[in-house]
Image (cartoon, rainbow, N blue to C red):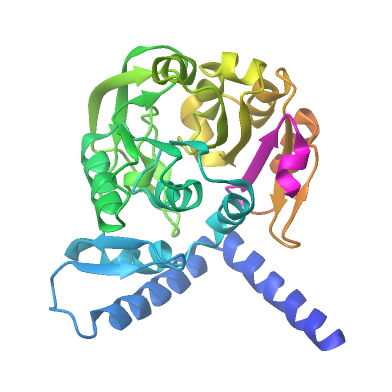
Amino acid sequence: MPGVELATRIADQARATLRRNARLRGSVVAAKDAAWRARVAVGTVRGGAVVVEDEYGIALLIPAGERDRLRSLMRRPGDRPAFTLMDRLLRGGDVVFDVGANLGVYSVHARRRSGAAGRVFAFEAVPATADRLAQTLALNRCLDVHVVRAAVTDAPGTATMHVFDDPACGWNSLGAHPMYGYDGAAVRPSASVEVEAVTLDAFAEREGVERVALCKVDVEGFERHVFTGAAGLLAGHRIGVLCFEISEDPLVGEGGTPAEVFESLAIHGYRTFRHDEATGTLVGPVDPAAEQAHLGASPVRPYVANYFSAADPSLLRV
């Protein structure tokens, strides 16, 4: 219908304008956050923590000082492709790795789909964030999810995690570089902590895991290290689907390129597809060099894109 197409085109142009204009984007985000704070504050004790449910029915405890995160926690359009895939892909008894679990929403959703017979491992290295993860699991009656308090990387031993103050804990990573808010302001890590480091290959062997149905990886630019440490699993095609993000700012800390991330999967026969926000479809399989050029040519800075990879691409169409 012409009217619908016109409205969609106007909305897409408006979103693109917001993403390009940091100051305008920051003002719009701030206004939306204020509206969410006002909505949730009704009926609660002002200044206290509040438990809310996100769009997937996952309960989250929001401390008083983090109410400005409400909208971004309760409505997460960037997560919808992965959550939709989990709904279609996961079956009772499946094993899921949630690498970089943060507050644990992926772990809860995976547990609900894989059932009591499944096994979900939530990897979160920073102690304070792992505590929040355990809290989310308890609120959602998912206490059988295994919380692994370790960084997942390319070699076992120890690693230094660089920690951002809440509510920016989602940026915690192995990189010490600054990140940037919606308004373009630099945010730097406030501390560092030494943590245990594990590889997925060694962990899977230790836990007797033969196959991983889904491995979600969100480690702020250090995805390539995770894939290197999972070379055995990947070579045997023992991970069904991987979902991860390529984001310009986090990659600065790792020092690599998008092409290198894609190639670390391609050498094991995995084909990677980009989620296209405009159409809601998967585009690919991508060529590493061409996809890097595509990202580099994006008018939206910094670029962010979600990817799904599988040795058997039919798993992405179930």
Residue at 30%, 22% in the rendered image = 160
Tell which residue pokes out farthest to the bottom in this image.
3
Q: Quadrant of the N terminus?
A: bottom right
Give how far across and how far down residue 55 sits, in percent: 46, 68
- Establish if 103 lies above or below 61: above
Say if residue 125 shows up in the picture.
yes
> Taking 173 as reference, is 268 left or right?
right
- Establish if 220 lies above or below 233: below
Where, by quadrant of the figure, is residue 259 drawn?
top right
> Taking 20 as reference, is 282 left or right?
right
Residue at 54%, 22% in the rendered image = 210
Give how far across and how far down residue 315 sits, in percent: 72, 41
Say if residue 165 shows up in the picture.
no
Q: Which stretch did the figure color magenta?
A: 301-318
Residue at 27%, 34% in the rendered image = 126
- Establish if 171 lies above or below 222: below
Magenta span includes 303: yes
Tell which residue pokes out farthest to the front in this image.
117
Magenta span includes 212: no
Give how far across and how far down residue 241 sits, in percent: 63, 36
Name the residue nearer the viewer: 265 or 15.
265
Where, by quadrant of the figure, is residue 34 drawn?
bottom left
- How many numbered badges does the structure rendering display? 0
> Taking 105 as reference, is 308 left or right?
right
Name the residue nearer the viewer: 18 or 272.
272
Name the residue nearer the viewer: 191 or 81.
81
> Taking 303 as reference, is 182 left or right?
left
